[in-house]
Amino acid sequence: MVLPFGCQMNRSDTERIRTVLNSMGLEESESEDDPDLAIKGIIACSIRQKAVDRVYGKIRNWNSSKWKPLTFLSGCFLPADGEKFEALFDFVFPIDLASKLPEMIRERTGDDFTNSISLPSGEFADSDVMEKRIESFWQLQPAYSSGSEAFIPIQNGCNRFCTFCAVPYTRSREVSRLPAGILAELRYLVGKDYRSFTLLGQNVNSYGHDRKDSKLNFAALMKSIGKIGRETGKDFWTYFTSPHPRDMNGALFDVIAEYDVLAKQIHLPLQSGDDEVLSRMNRNYSVADYQQVVHEIRGTLPGATLFTDIIVGFCGETDAQFERTLEAMREIQFDMAYIAKYSPRPGAASAGWADDVSREVKEQRFAKAGEVLREIASRKKREMLASKQKVLLCGRNEQKGYFSGYTEGRVPVRLALDAVNAKSAEKNVENRSRVGEFTTARITSTGSLSVEGRML
Ligand code: SAM
Ligand code: SF4
């Protein structure tokens, strides 16, 4: 059993770790309390202290149970936490060493899992050890958790050193995955009729900058994906997360506009609407720079939805500075915002500064920013009322009688199942087979963050 904590990158890493475990002859269990479990693991997230606390909670719980299988921890963790985790887990290793897990187990327990895996042996022209290790990790064939949507890692680590962020310390410097591997994985999945791909990295639009090949860049990678769409004639949507506003350029938007398989949805973290706070965050852009990028997006991709990340209560953030974040949210009119309360991360530069916005004020700002988001987002969703939308069906709830899915702009949609026949066995089979497919729907009601409709 492997539990991913946190972001999509961790869920993607989990799919590759499952391959390692499957290759050892182990099968995934549905339940953490299954008495036959041989090994339990966590793919940790260190973006916020809350996620780290969850790891401590979970392992203490596992360790205090009467019967205890082997435990491991990987993913994003800070060196300081790593030392503490070593005392609590049987194995703690960086994600790029996941394929060594069978060897680690053998050394520790003498247990020889029968189908010990063969490690991929890539050809690496100009790579250092770290780069080789992460490339071999990427070469593992993932045990995908969905038959229609996939995360595809394109990069690991980050060179930007925003002062609040743990990533450069948990995942180290940027390494871009070679395009051949990315495109081969995507082609394979397109061949299996996958409908939605999300390219993953911490700063995806600096993709390729660490490689010697000057032609390698994010817009070129996206163009290659667009061409795969045209060549194969398959229908799919390609998303990416997260880019950095500083590394955005118009060439990328032109490419997205050119190809149908490149989804018209942009996730562009703003973090704060105040220039002084942005500067202390080491974001390297001003609110005006950010708005210029938004202007380009809306010029080239008029129907695209815009998502963002916001941090409230960063060190020294005054009421007036927070108000400017709300103003920016209102001006820019985001379709969605992931709002976080600042928490200091050991190792990141801001951890040495006073975390001087009280918990109470952070809570108030968090609630206020959520309110503003819902205000803006409800208005934008109302514009969808009565419109016809293409929807990817990704799940269904037979009891409650609906399909869940999303539009190209990643707006969540609920569509009523056929109410009269929903309970018939035949209808159930039909409903099940539609999950993973596109459908067309008429939007019949709207909320702040999602909409409802009926299939046409
Ligand atoms: N690379 C992206 C960017 O440039 O903004 C961000 C990736 S980060 C892994 C995901 C989000 O977590 C950030 O956008 C930020 O809003 C949030 N985050 C990161 N560090 C945080 C901290 N110390 N406290 C609260 N939220 C944090
Ligand atoms: Fe963290 Fe994103 Fe900044 Fe990199 S660019 S340091 S991942 S917030």
Image: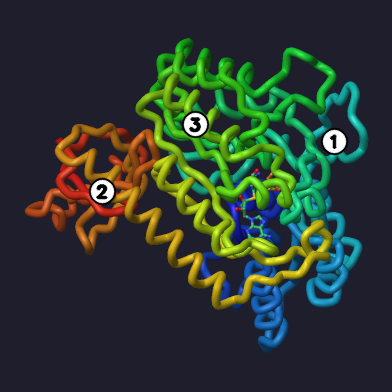
Circles 1 and 2, Cβ within 8 Å, touching? The answer is no
What's the residue type where badge 1 is placed? Glu
Q: Earlier in the sequence, mark 3 or mark 2?
A: 3
Residue at image mark 1: 131
- Give the Cα distance between marks 3 and 2: 24 Å
For disc 2, the neighbor class at 10 Å (few under 14, some 14 to 19, many from 20) is: many
Q: Is residue 99 among the parts visible in the rendering?
A: no
Task: Report x, y in % for residue 23.
Answer: 70, 49
Is residue 160 left or right of 1 when viewed as pictured? right
Is residue 239 left or right of 445 when viewed as pictured? right
Q: Is the CB of mark 2 within 8 Å of ligand 1?
A: no
Q: Report the quarter where the N terminus lies.
A: bottom right
What's the residue type where badge 2 is placed? Val
What is the secondary structure assignment of the residue under circle 2? strand
Q: Report the quarter where the C terminus lies.
A: top left
Q: Residue at x 39, y 44 (%)?
A: 335
Mark in the foreground, 1 or 3? 3
Task: Report x, y in % for residue 355.
Answer: 71, 70
In the picture as drawn, the residue positioned furthest to the left comes out as 420
Q: Nearer the viewer, residue 206 or 290?
A: 290
What's the residue type where badge 3 is placed? Val
Q: Is residue 30 among the parts visible in the rendering?
A: yes
- The image's colour scheme reads rainbow
Q: Nearer the viewer, residue 331 or 156?
A: 331
Task: Report x, y in % for residue 255.
Answer: 52, 16
Q: Which mark is residue 294?
A: 3
Rendered position, 70 above or below 113: below
In the picture as drawn, the residue positioned furthest to the front comes out as 320
Residue at image mark 2: 451
Q: Residue at x 51, y 16 (%)?
A: 254
